[in-house]
Amino acid sequence: MSRRQALVTMGALFALAACSGDGGNGDKSKTSGEDLSAHSDGAMPDYGVGKQFKATVPLTFSILYNNHPFYPIKKDWLFWSELTKRTNVTLEPNVVPLSDYENKRSLLIGAGDAPLIIPKTYPGQETAFVASGAILPVSDYIDLMPHFKDKVAKWNLQADIDTLRQADGRFYLLPGLHQDYWVDYSLAIRVDILEKLGLQIPQTLEELHQVLRAMKEEYPDSYPWTDRWNNPTPGGALLNIIGMAFGARGGWGFLNGVTWDPNAQKFVYTGAMDAYRQMLQYLNGLVKEGLLDPDSFTQTDEQAIQKLVSGKSFVISANAQVLVNEYRPPLKKANPKAKLVKIPVPIGPMGPIKATPNDTRLENGIMISKKARESRNFVAMMQFIDWLWYSDEGQIFAKWGVEGVTYTRDASGKFRLTKDVDFVGLNPGAPKHLQQDFGFSNGVFAYGGSTELLQSTFSEEEIEFQKVMNSRRAMPVAPPRPLTEEEREQATLWETPLKDHVMQNTLQFILGKRSLDEWDAYVAELEGKNMSAYINLINNAYERYKQQHG
């Protein structure tokens, strides 16, 4: 199917056969053509890849705005005025506190009062609004978004996009698109302790085990590894990180409890997988030896950090931001010789992988209110969204701001903040802040993009970490398994008690309160909570989708 980027007249442009919403690989949505000529006011007739969008008349679009307390919204941000200057579009934000965003979003959509553009929606969250018809099946209109299509095709994202499809074959969310997987969370280790003990940074789970043993031997009163991030899921980060090595994500990565088995070509229940049992066995062994603090699954973040800072522990879950902002400053103050480093995720039975089948390269994205389709400016709005969120130029603008004002680029193209602007500690002590004073690198507008752009704000240390992780292989993306509205209701009734039982027993197995000899009994308990019926429902949905859409 042609990309239709070079079109001669407005009439030709907007009488689209909206059926190629897959980046050029043959869309599986069964949609018919629509004449959009009556909805093209302000649109560019020659808009395409690499072109700056600028509405032919001044336009205003409403947008739901997630107000972050670290950089609360300001009317005089350079972001707003420069955006209007470049695009001829003024955004009218409906401001909602971050803490109430999801609830307020649901209420506004349910009442029919939602703004036209609804960002900060994570894949799966849109499903609740599909049946009511309140949000637009955006896959019908991807031909209006050449930059989105170009990136899907160029980065081979079609399988990831297909995971968004609903039972009707369409998708209702425009996700953030990443060129590659982005692994941020791993373990941070006191490498000064490793040097003292004559040890190397552990590359595997077995080497991690040996390092923890050596630390315990040297510091018998310590728990070498203590952890944090127990809200809303106990062991949220810890189980997610270690689960990757086994191919059975726990904690934050457990999600709806379903994992794609590429060998069996079917979905299985994560909490009953032998790989999940192996993960629990590994962690239980660490607890038994006094190497992993049992409080890791119940304590507050502050308690875990205090143990690290006071020298009672030497290993903790981390991402790039908390390593720099939350761990190193108090640790350096308490012990100037301490050296904490985030290490690549230790390799386990799955070998060197950077993603499990549960992972995609999609990020939070945008829903569009159904009423936008009736606007005379609908096509212009889709072009605007395409430019700001999906074009290289739009993504650089949203992330870095205005060249010469907030950033410069050297001869090699490397970005640098101007001397009076700070962001993520790149210019410590600078009087202005990229987010707070200018509105750029705002989570509502800046996400996704090329690996180069993603890493443009990374330290050299973090770039080295990413090089190691990106050199690893990714597992095949799980195929679509969209449920009908009735199936979703049934799945929810089964999914919640199953997940609750898994989470409860996960902690009991790890902490030794339940013996792993009782694994078969535990699986039978899951069976008694409709595990097979739940998985059959998921697999039947997968088979149905495969038959209908290929």
Image (tube, grey):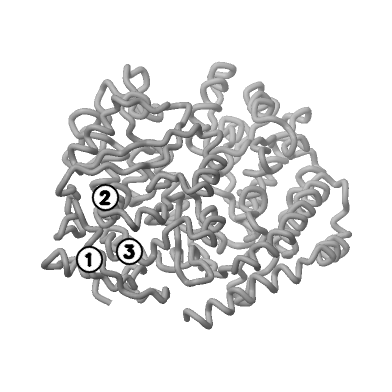
Three-letter code for the amino acid on which mark 3 is drawn: Ile
Residue projecting furthest to the left: 8
Q: In the image, 288: left or right of 117?
A: right
- Element at badge 1? helix
For the point 82% across and 64% down, the residue is 523
Residue annotated with mark 1: 14
| Residue 531, above or below 211 | below
Residue annotated with mark 3: 142
Three-letter code for the amino acid on which mark 1 is drawn: Phe
| Residue 509, above or below 86 | below
Q: In the image, 110: left or right of 215?
A: left
Question: In this view of the protein, which residue sits in the foreground, 112 or 363?
Answer: 112
Q: Which mark is residue 384?
A: 2
For the point 26% across and 57% down, the residue is 379
Disc number lying in front (3 or 1): 1
Q: Quadrant of residue 417?
A: top left
Residue at mark 3 to residue at mark 2: CA–CA distance: 13 Å
- Element at badge 3? helix
Is the residue marked by circle 1 packed among few (<14), some (14-19), or many (20+) residues within 10 Å? many
Q: Is there CB contact under 8 Å for labels 3 and 1?
A: no
For the point 26% across and 46% down, the residue is 394
Question: In this view of the protein, which residue sits in the foreground, 468 or 29?
Answer: 29
Is the residue marked by circle 2 packed among few (<14), some (14-19), or many (20+) residues within 10 Å? many
Three-letter code for the amino acid on which mark 2 is drawn: Phe
> Which numbered disc, 3 or 2, marks the residue that appears first in the sequence?
3
Percent x, y of residue 8:
11, 67
